[in-house]
């Protein structure tokens, strides 16, 4: 369980965040200078050097999006120019990639960040440039929404495994549909049948909340509140649910912690997004109160479970059911050990979850609710990951990664195990590095009293967050 310890504020973490972005600049330059685009997208490191995997190229947006976050955090124009040029040159194919569920990862991290920065007047963008980014986001949202499996009462965006497969990861890719909807777009299908992207967003989120997340209500023998199934399987002939599965976790009946983190952050962001819409936009889907109720139920269940199953410093091991955890004894009462020989930790899950905990904590507190526990847990994780003297921040100029001890696909054996070790360790991933930068930017903006960071470029309904948290913890 996360040991929050004493209270901390975003301002307390500014020195660590500034150091992170100093290191981040070196890492981005190193990859840009040494990477061969013909190899595809960099995915994870081996002996400190980024390598490709050649599997859907789902990390390309994190590579170029990282440069845009670097500009956002530091104002260094070189990184804006880099992220902007590489987005235009190399990301178009991802806009029309109909075979994946990852549009929110690739396209919102690039075109979406550029659109947001232009709307925030962070750089001079012509009307046509801003329209170009908007058009890209419309296309991406519609293509993502077209990958649709119908089930009774709704449907879901199917994973690249096929129409039968719902991945919990995709809750965060709903950002693509959200932006396309905000930009006034809709999907047209056979015989000009119009499809609301907001409707598909809500139906997918509802399917994820119902089938991917457990609530301790007796669904099966392993129904623990907040537990997450990586994959949910359906009979595509009639849309009936068949059971849980897992691609990257230990089993269908344990929780792959990065999947838990995706759910935690995805629901927190969608709650913020719905808050930016008018009441009349939500009436056809049960109304604001009903939507908020089940989304908050999912967000709080997964957040509570993450706080419970992470180690004391906020970093989780890769799966809650990993068999080697038994050899680690009372591992939950002490900081995670990335150098143990039984089970690897996953720092990328921690970086993703930290942002979700912070967003949920901010949302609840801004409305007079019990958000302090989540907020402080999120800051505790950030403090752990960004400590220059700790094991997670990569300070070596010889290592291209930023966040160490990330895990990709443990069952598949894709992760590098260094000589003399028995478990993966010491390596980085594009998603881990990107989300480390993203949560750092989020905390930095709150600490400085700057515009609240959202993918949809909308401020919270009140400014209580900034008033309370630029100088101290949420209360």
Image (cartoon, helix red, strand yellow):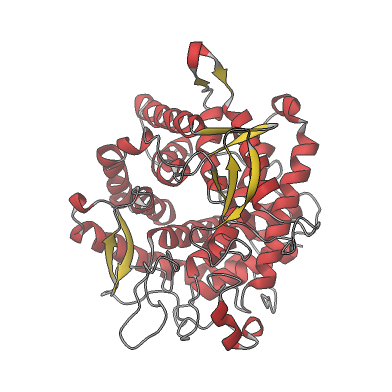
Where's residue 210, x and y in %? 70, 46
Image quarter hosting the N terminus: bottom right
Which residue does the image show at 74% across and 59% down from the upper left?
220
Most foreground residue, 419 or 339: 419
Q: Is residue 455 left or right of residue 118?
A: right
Against 142, residue 51 (above or below) is below
Most foreground residue, 473 or 86: 86
Asked if residue 472 shows in the view, the reply is no
Which residue does the image show at 68% across and 78% down from the upper left?
3
Which residue does the image show at 24% across and 39% down from the upper left?
89
Residue 288 lies in what quarter of the image? top right
Against 309, residue 82 (above or below) is above
Asked if residue 282 shows in the view, the reply is yes
Q: Is residue 300 left or right of residue 420?
A: right
Where's residue 181, x and y in %? 55, 28
Most foreground residue, 135 or 21: 135
Residue furthest out toward the top: 191
Where's residue 238, x and y in %? 63, 33
Image quarter hosting the C terminus: bottom right
């Amino acid at each position: 369980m996360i040991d929050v310890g004493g209270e901390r504020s975003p301002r307390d973490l500014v020195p660590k965040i500034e150091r992170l972005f100093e290191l981040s600049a070196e890492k981005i330059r190193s990859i840009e200078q040494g990477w061969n685009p013909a190899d595809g997208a960099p995915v994870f490191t081996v002996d400190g050097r980024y390598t490709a995997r050649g599997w859907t190229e789902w990390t390309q947006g994190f590579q170029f999006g990282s440069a845009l976050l670097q500009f956002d955090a530091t104002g260094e124009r070189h990184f804006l120019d880099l992220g902007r040029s590489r987005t235009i040159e190399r990301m178009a194919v991802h806009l029309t990639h109909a075979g994946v569920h990852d549009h929110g990862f690739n396209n919102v991290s690039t075109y979406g960040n550029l659109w947001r920065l232009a709307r925030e007047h962070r750089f001079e963008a012509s009307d046509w440039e801003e329209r170009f980014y908007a058009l890209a986001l419309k296309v991406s949202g519609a293509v993502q929404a077209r990958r649709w499996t119908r089930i009774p009462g709704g449907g879901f965006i199917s994973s690249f495994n096929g129409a039968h497969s719902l991945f919990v990861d995709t809750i965060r890719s709903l950002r693509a549909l959200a932006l396309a909807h905000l930009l006034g777009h809709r999907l047209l299908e056979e015989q000009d049948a119009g499809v609301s992207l907001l409707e598909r967003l809500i139906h997918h989120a509802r399917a994820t909340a119902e089938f991917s997340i457990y609530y301790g209500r007796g669904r099966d023998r392993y129904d623990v509140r907040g537990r997450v199934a990586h994959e949910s399987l359906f009979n595509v002939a009639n849309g009936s649910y068949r059971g849980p599965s897992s691609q990257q976790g230990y089993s269908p009946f344990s929780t792959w912690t990065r999947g838990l983190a995706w759910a935690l952050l995805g629901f927190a962001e969608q709650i913020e997004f719905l808050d930016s819409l008018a009441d009349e936009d939500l009436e056809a889907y049960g109304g604001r109160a009903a939507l908020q109720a089940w989304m908050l139920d999912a967000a709080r269940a997964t957040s509570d479970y993450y706080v419970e199953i992470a180690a004391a410093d906020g970093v989780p091991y890769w799966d809650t059911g990993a068999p080697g955890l038994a050899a680690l004894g009372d591992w939950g009462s002490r900081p995670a050990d990335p150098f143990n020989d039984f089970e690897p930790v996953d720092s990328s899950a921690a970086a993703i979850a930290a942002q979700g905990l912070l967003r949920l904590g901010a949302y609840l507190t801004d409305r007079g609710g019990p958000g302090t526990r989540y907020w402080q847990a999120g800051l505790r994780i950030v403090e752990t990951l960004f400590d220059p003297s700790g094991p997670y921040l990569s300070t070596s100029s010889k290592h291209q990664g930023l966040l160490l001890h990330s895990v990709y696909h443990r069952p598949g054996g894709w992760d590098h195990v260094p000589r003399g070790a028995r478990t993966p360790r010491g390596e980085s991933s594009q998603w881990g590095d990107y989300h480390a930068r993203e949560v750092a930017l989020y905390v930095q903006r709150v600490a400085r009293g700057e515009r609240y960071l959202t993918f949809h470029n909308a401020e919270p309904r009140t400014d209580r967050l900034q008033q309370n948290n630029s100088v101290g913890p949420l209360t």
